[in-house]
Image (spheres, rainbow, N blue to C red):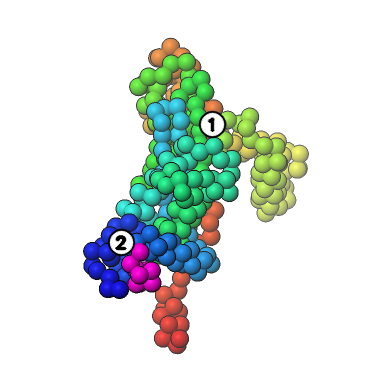
């Protein structure tokens, strides 16, 4: 049967797929719109499998919130930064964040198997497959984390249009605009300074031992390079390491970091929160934070454009 332009337009609006793909799907299914949608979904699955070997290290992190009591951050990756700025992609990631906000999934497998928030007849994985068909690039829902406040409030911050997403969970007996603004500032601090822990009590012993081992090796090497009459015994070097370790631990612990907006350049984050808390008749304690940075820990592929062109010419 003849496929009309109106049918192609309708299928494009439903699926977001390319015009020729829509025409091909309608032709293959004799104009059956539902069957054509399914055809494109299956085609999208094929595309997803074909793209499985590619590296998706770009993308965005977005946060969905429910007042100041519930928040979820997600990271969805793409192959290129160009796609990461695509409005359809960003809209999709916002829906994934909304899904995470209302999810009880304990891990990524369970999350991907959940009924999709936009269409319960599909799973989250199905929605991803369909988006791959639309974008024509490998996409990956990499991770999510949901945080619910207890005895306090949450604050969130998205930096660089989605490059970094931060959620802060704080305990406070008072919830007002001043404290919300302070926690927003702390979320910005976390985005900028990338602490690993809230306080030094959270630092695992194996991390402490590892850092001490590295610093000791560095100090011994420096000591060996000194003239013999200026070298120090190892027990003295180990005592000197205490200062270095304390400095490093302060840099990776949020409470001990210098607050980036401190007027005197000395006030720590803990002191800043104590100041705001006192002014509002309460104490403010950061219980935990979540910081997602797009692509962190993913080895990005580096393409040689000249080699790629030559390979195509030879092919």
Residue with the mark numbered 1: 288
Q: Nearer the viewer, residue 310 or 83?
A: 83
x and y percent of residue 149 in the render? 49, 26
* CA–CA distance in space, label 1 to label 2: 44 Å
Extreme-bottom residue of the structure: 314
The answer to whether any part of residue 51 appears in the image is: no
Q: Earlier in the sequence, mark 1 or mark 2?
A: 2
> Does the magenta segment cover residue 72?
no
Q: Quadrant of residue 27?
A: bottom left
Q: Is residue 26 one of those drawn in magenta? A: yes
51 left or right, relative to 179: right
Where residue 12 is drawn, which disc sits there?
Answer: 2
For residue 174, the mark is none
Query: Dot 2: what SS?
Result: helix
Q: Is residue 29 visible?
A: yes
Q: Quadrant of residue 197?
A: top right
């Amino acid at each position: 049967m003849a496929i009309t332009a109106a049918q192609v337009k309708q299928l494009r609006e439903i699926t977001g797929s390319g015009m020729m793909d829509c025409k091909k799907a309608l032709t293959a299914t004799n104009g059956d719109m539902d069957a054509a949608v399914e055809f494109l979904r299956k085609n999208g699955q094929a595309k997803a499998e074909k793209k499985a070997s590619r590296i998706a290290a770009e993308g965005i992190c977005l946060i969905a919130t429910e007042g100041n009591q519930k928040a979820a951050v997600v990271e969805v990756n793409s192959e290129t930064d160009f796609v990461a700025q695509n409005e359809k992609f960003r809209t999709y990631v916002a829906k994934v964040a909304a899904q995470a906000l209302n999810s009880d999934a304990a891990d990524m497998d369970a999350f991907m198997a959940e009924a999709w928030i936009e269409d319960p007849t599909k799973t989250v994985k199905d929605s991803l497959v369909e988006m791959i068909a639309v974008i024509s690039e490998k996409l990956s829902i990499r991770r999510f984390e949901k945080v619910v406040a207890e005895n306090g409030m949450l604050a969130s911050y998205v930096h660089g249009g989605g490059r970094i997403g931060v959620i802060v969970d704080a305990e406070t007996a008072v919830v007002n605009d001043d404290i919300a603004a302070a926690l927003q500032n702390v979320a910005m601090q976390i985005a900028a300074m990338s602490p690993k822990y809230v306080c030094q009590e959270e630092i695992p012993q194996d991390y402490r031992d590892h850092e001490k081992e590295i610093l000791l090796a560095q100090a011994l090497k420096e000591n060996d390079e000194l003239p013999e009459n200026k070298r120090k015994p190892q027990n003295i070097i180990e005592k000197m390491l205490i200062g270095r370790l304390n400095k490093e631990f302060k840099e990776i612990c949020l409470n001990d970091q210098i607050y980036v907006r401190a007027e005197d350049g000395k006030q720590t984050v803990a002191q800043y929160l104590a100041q705001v808390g006192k002014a509002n008749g309460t104490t403010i304690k950061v219980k935990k934070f979540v910081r997602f940075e797009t692509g962190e820990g993913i080895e990005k592929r580096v393409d040689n454009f000249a080699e790629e062109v030559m390979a195509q010419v030879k092919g």
